[in-house]
Amino acid sequence: MASVEMRNIVKKYGDGFPAVNDVSLDIADGEFMILVGPSGCGKSTLLRMVVGLEDITSGDMIIGGQRVNDKAPRDRNLSMVFQNYALYPHLTVYENIAFPLRLKKADGDEIRRRVTEAADVLELHEHLERKPANLSGGQRQRVAMGRAIVRAADAFLFDEPLSNLDAKLRGQMRTEIARLQRRLGITTIYVTHDQTEAMTLGDRVCVLRKGLIQQVASPRELYEQPVNLFVAGFIGSPPMNFLPAKAHGGKLETPFGTIVLDQRRADAVGERDLVLVGIRPEYFEDASLVDEATRDVGTVFRATVDVTEWLGDSQYAYLPFDAPPEVAAQLRDLSRELDSDQLRTQAVVSIDAASRLREGQEAQFWLDSRKVHVFDPASGDNLTRDAEAGAELTRMAGEDRAAQVEQARAGALG
């Protein structure tokens, strides 16, 4: 097992386009790191440079303290699980898992022991004599993971391994991958475009945009303290709402009324003619369902409901608002980049499933003023981000994870 260090990694293709542009990232021994971002952000290219399937234009790739830029993939001792499983159709499950050991000319007893151990971990014993064509998608992916496990590699690399599975299987396999990584305590780099996978699996998440790192943090820090508009819009489902506003005197004048900022945020924002106010859907509520003590810490406003979506355990209401043309255009551009159709001149608010609000009705809503973010529309920077609070969230997550890795390794040695 080993740490992975990337030092100013650049990947340029023949036309000079930088698919990865000056990426520096440290991944600790035993850490589960997620590389996430929309299509074309460079995450898969970066992973392929780690394993050696892509040449590095400039920079240093260091694995276990050794520079590996010039090492072939077979000499890096890494295990990679691909999106398409990459199983041999003519071999049984047993032989697919055993394949990397046979390449290394391991003896028969060693092969049987390692394949049996992998089958125990992944619950594949009853399928060892079957062929891949007779397995479900989830079973095939477990076989691919078994082949990675038996190599006793320094790190696992996953390249969108669940994207070919249906929604139910994705949820099941996500749990299995998390359990496996926690059990083995092995360094893992996982590429995905699915922010749900990123938020549920990773110790830390690296958000990429056009080959550049936007933010590296624990899932909770990304959610609660996003560094800019891009991260705020990418993380969260439904995504954060962005409202145009004028900032003056410690207040924000928004399409839904006045929001009073606390002193720290008011000082950070200052006086500005145009800002974007970021509010997550769950920070709203039907005002009629909010008790008086809670109402006092937020803002109550009136709005007309355009559409409602009742999901049983939750409910969404869509509230249109007016925005200057430049803001509407910026939201459309960001929505296209994020492969989302929800960043528009409407707020998506999450309200209690018990609410009886209906389409076309004007009603009172409440929002939690303590949790709003304020962004500079020109730079995209989060003006109200509490960097110290965010760093503390990631530090605590790192300490918890380090303890889990030590426990996993102690169990393995025992």
Image (tube, rainbow, N blue to C red):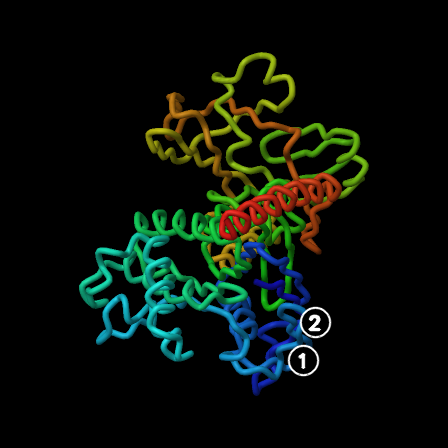
Mark 2 and mark 1 in contact (Cβ < 8 Å)? Answer: yes
Q: Which residue is mark 1?
A: 58
Q: Position of residue 117 (x, y in %)?
A: 37, 58
Labelled disc at residue 403: none
Q: Position of residue 18 (x, y in %)?
A: 61, 76
- For the question of whether residue 71 can be seen, the reply is yes
Labelled disc at residue 8: 2
Foreground of the two, 373 or 300:
373
Image quarter of residue 241: top right
Foreground of the two, 231 or 251:
231
Query: Element under label 2?
Result: strand
Q: Position of residue 90 (x, y in %)?
A: 22, 76
In this rendering, is residue 39 above or below 183?
Answer: below
Image quarter of residue 220: top right
Foreground of the two, 18 or 126:
126
Q: Quick one: which residue is furthest to the top in this view?
A: 292
> Is 148 on the left-hand or right-hand side of 214?
left
Residue at 70% x, 34% y is 252
For label 2, count other residues whose C-alpha is less than 10 Å away and answer few (under 14), some (14-19) or many (20+). some
Foreground of the two, 101 or 123:
101
> Is 292 on the left-hand or right-hand side of 339?
right
- Spatial separation of the CA atoms under disc 1 and disc 2: 7 Å
In this rendering, is residue 325 above or below 158?
Answer: above
Query: Element under label 1?
Result: strand
Residue type at mark 2 is Asn
Residue at 81% x, 36% y is 267
Residue at 67% x, 50% y is 227
Q: Position of residue 294 (x, y in %)?
A: 59, 17
| Quarter of the image with the N terminus in it | bottom right
> Is 247 on the left-hand or right-hand side of 104?
right
Q: Identify the mark nearer the N-term, 1 or 2.
A: 2
- For the question of whether residue 343 can be seen, the reply is no
